[in-house]
Amino acid sequence: AVSAAPTSIGGLPVDEIARRVKVELRERMRSLRRAIGDGARAEKSALIAERVAALDAWRGARTVMLFVPMRTEVDVTLLEAIARAHGKDVAAPRMTPDGRDLEVRRWEAGVAPVESGRMVREPPESAPLVPESSVDLVVVPALALDPTGGRLGYGAGLYDSLLPRLTRATRVGIALDFQLIAEVPVTAGDEPMHVVITESRTLTVGSET
């Protein structure tokens, strides 16, 4: 008979252990990411953009959802330009006023993102809402990813809440090579990626290119 997975280890619930590991992993990944120079980040970001743009799911997408990058994140500016050059509609997340959820807003060409007050930039309040069901592909930031699509986010669970509502979207998690680890700790509510991309690898569930 197959034995059941343990619910606790050393007296601690498995979920609590995973949460503690996530906290430590976030700190380590933030520190490593901050240490990368702007030039190297720009070069790696360009390689990631090329890999995303080579996906069949990207080529076939009419509406793509990106994110307004923070300074130390993968810069998706080139990917934004590629999307616009090919006539795609570009969307980006905007926090709800209470900071507990994300809305999908149009990222309009020539309209500068605004500071949210929560250390992120986002489309302005005037940006039109985009129907969640219309998003064909979503590019998701991450602090760590694994080959099975596991993603370590920033801890607020905002993307984990949003992704199930993007019912037709291919989920593409992007990060730098060092952020691809063997296994991301999983806790309740975590949403997996369909594709994982770094500057040197494109991984989908069960295959690699």
Image (cartoon, rainbow, N blue to C red):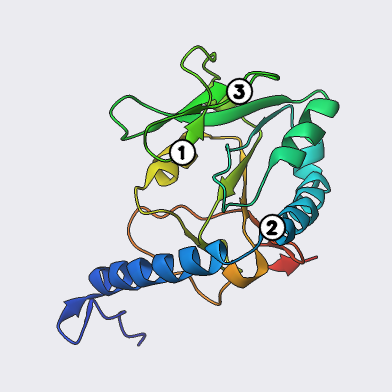
| Tag of residue 112 | 3
How many marks are shown on the rendered structure? 3
Looking at the rendered structure, the kind of residue marked 2 is: Arg
Label 2 – label 1 distance at C-alpha: 18 Å
Label 3 – label 2 distance at C-alpha: 22 Å
Q: In what element is the residue under mark 2?
A: helix
Where 102 falls versus 56 (above or below)?
above
The residue sitting at 51% across, 55% down in the picture is 192
Packing grade of label 1 (10 A; few <14, some 14-19, many >=20) is: some
Packing grade of label 2 (10 A; few <14, some 14-19, many >=20) is: some
Q: In what element is the residue under mark 1?
A: loop
The residue sitting at 28% across, 28% down in the picture is 98
The residue sitting at 73% across, 61% down in the picture is 40
- Per the image, the residue denoted by label 2 is 41
Q: 29 left or right of 84?
A: left
Looking at the rendered structure, the kind of residue marked 1 is: Val
Where 29 falls versus 112 (above or below)?
below
Work out whether residue 95 or residue 147 is closer to the camera in this orientation and state it: 95
Looking at the image, tell me whether mark 3 or mark 2 is earlier in sequence order: 2
Work out whether residue 143 or residue 163 is closer to the camera in this orientation and state it: 143
